[in-house]
Amino acid sequence: MGSTNLFSQESYTLQDDTAKEIYIQISGVIVKGKTMAPVAFATVMDKSTYRGTSSDFYGFFSFVGMPGDTLIFSCLGFKNTSYIIPDTLTKGRYSLIQAMEEDTIMLAQANIYPWPTREEFRDAFLNTDIPNDDLTRAQNNLDQEVLAYKQEAYPAGGSLNYKWQMNDIKEQLYYKGQSPPNNLLNPIAWSQFIRAWKNGDFKN
């Protein structure tokens, strides 16, 4: 695994040179190698102690390590990379900018068939019930028996009730101040009634 350290710096002394162990405050930013955009929530782990941390939303991380430790950087969608902390450090702080290379995972091709065998596919293909076309469905929806059933099964909606109420009010206003017509004395209505009676229109 390779590593890319773009920038590092050392600051004040944590312990004197006679100390056997020096602990370093490792701080840095993890970025994408091409765009330099931050890599959020990447894992930073010490290879020897398995201790570490993760970067925040801006790619920043910080934890305590020792000179000579190997840091492993990993994140979903990126290739793992490593960086060895220089063993010549005598200061208490060390910072770096670590670049990670994006990784594209190519999955093997998978062929999914709805039927286990060719024979079952052939049987299903030949016996497929093809649905009706648009004209047939429209004719079925306009069938008189279907419409009559829907008319009796479904109550009147708000728009139909409103239209009936408005027609009733309009009829009352039309004959307001006078008596409405009475078809009991209308000779035309009587002739239509007799003709319909002779034709058998009132038979069940």
Image (cartoon, helix red, strand yellow):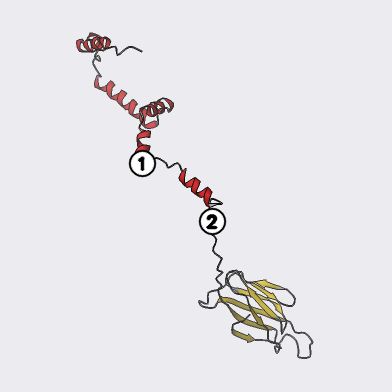
Residue at the front extreme of this rendering: 119
Residue type for callout 2:
Ile
In percent of width and height, residue 98 lies at 60, 79
40 vs 16, nearest the viewer: 40
Q: Residue at x 34, y 39 (%)?
A: 135
Give the mark nearer the N terminus: 2 vs 1: 2
Residue denoted by label 1: 134
Q: Residue at x 47, y 47 (%)?
A: 125
CA neighbours of label 1 inside 10 A, class few (<14), some (14 to 19), many (20+) = few
149 vs 12, nearest the viewer: 149
**Residue 203 vertical position relative to residue 31 in the rendered view, above or below:** above
- Label annotation for residue 112: 2
Quadrant showing the C terminus = top left
Residue type for callout 1:
Asp
**Residue 92 vertical position relative to residue 191 in the rendered view, above or below:** below
Q: Residue 55's quadrant in the figure?
A: bottom right
187 vs 198, nearest the viewer: 198
**Residue 138 vertical position relative to residue 121 in the rendered view, above or below:** above
In percent of width and height, residue 61 lies at 63, 74
Select label 2 or label 1 by which is in front. Answer: 2
CA neighbours of label 2 inside 10 A, class few (<14), some (14 to 19), many (20+) = few
Q: Residue 188's quadrant in the figure?
A: top left
Q: Residue at x 69, y 74 (%)?
A: 45
Label 1, secondary structure: give it.
helix
Quadrant showing the N terminus = bottom right
User: Is 42 left, or right, of 19 in this rendering?
Assistant: left
Residue at the left extreme of this rendering: 187
